[in-house]
Image (cartoon, rainbow, N blue to C red):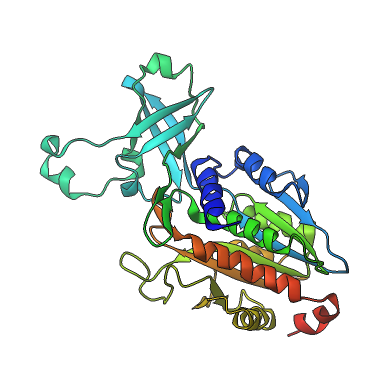
Amino acid sequence: MNNMDEKIFLKQLSEAHGPSGKEKWVHPLIEKAFQDCCNIKKDNVNNLYLTKEGTGKGKIMIMAHCDEVFLMVSEIIDKGYLKVKGTGIDPKTLVSQKVLIHGYKKIEGIIGIKPPHLMNSDEREKAITIDEILVDTGYSKEELEKIVRVGDYITIKREMVELLNNNVACKCADDRAGIVAMKCCLDEIKNINHELDVCFVASCQEETGIRGARVATANVMPDIGIAIDTTFDSGLLGDQGRENKIGQGPVICIGPNIHPKVRKKIMSIAKEYNIPFQLEVEPGHTGTDAWNIQTVKEGVPTLLISIPIKHMHTSVELINIDDIKNTGRLIAKFIEKLKDSELEELLCF
């Protein structure tokens, strides 16, 4: 894919809706992108498997989660308002957002707040909580109860915005950008006689506790597992304890969740092909699918390759298209250079 193709695919994926547990809503877009080269399967929890066979033995799994953070209807109250519960979303980022309510039919709503003119001094100073968030639909309660039920999903409705320097801002770049990176990888290996079978997995329920990764890994049982996710940039409003910079390439993780020899191998390939990359240290839980890939059955040698973003878990996650492309290209070169005869030596500690 060229940059325009990647932007279009990310736009399609990010503007689609696939909250945890309803990932199947976004599956058709992913299947369409991968169907020419891959065998497609699903499992009982909404993981999507896209497999391209190799010429030898061995198996490598590339995983990016396709679920997004979301809200759920907890109560239908007077004057067409909905109370909500949420996961992964800071309530203060929800004010003034447009949302989509997935009821018997899809309807739009907005999340408003009392105007400052009408607030008392205590209301002006305190932070808003999820219990105070109300979704305004414009319906009466009686009309709304015919369309919406307690437990229905609500997702942010936001179009992707193109910015300078090949940056874009959109909802759920975490981790739809990882899906785009997998497609970039597939395009790179499409006409290559790689030895290992490559199983791309669009995993489910990462945002609710990395649940799909364990099931998918048990089903695939790869020799190597690579999780693609997003990570915090280190600029203003970012994690200034890191050195991740948007536009300077994928971020390779170092820590106990990561297999040291496999990590050194992919770093050497990045240097060989002049693919820019960055490093980050995670001494504990990486908070990604990599955490559960590693510990399935007898254990899986695992890598985590992350794409830096700004404003994580908001509707304006900012990401660089070149970083997505280089993530896919790096993993593709790793697959191309990997021989099944090398696996035993590479995978021992």
Residue 91 at x, y percent in the picture: 34, 47
Seen at 62% across and 57% down, the residue is 64
Seen at 57% across and 55% down, the residue is 209
Picture quadrant of residue 195: bottom right
Residue 267 appears left or right of 54 = left
Residue 285 appears left or right of 94 = right
Picture quadrant of residue 219: bottom right
Residue 291 appears left or right of 115 = right
In front of the other: 152 or 165: 165
Relative height, residue 128 to residue 243 (above, below): above
Residue 13 at x, y percent in the picture: 55, 45
Seen at 75% across and 46% down, the residue is 43
Relative height, residue 110 to residue 87 (above, below): above
Q: How many marks?
A: 0
Which quadrant of the rendered structure holds the N terminus?
Answer: bottom right
Picture quadrant of residue 118: top left
**Which residue sits furthest top?**
142
Relative height, residue 227 to residue 23 (above, below): below
Camera sees residue 106: yes
Camera sees residue 290: no
**Which residue sits furthest right?**
56
In front of the other: 298 or 330: 330
Seen at 36% across and 66% down, the residue is 238
Residue 265 at x, y percent in the picture: 68, 82
Residue 346 at x, y percent in the picture: 76, 82
Which quadrant of the rendered structure holds the C terminus?
Answer: bottom right
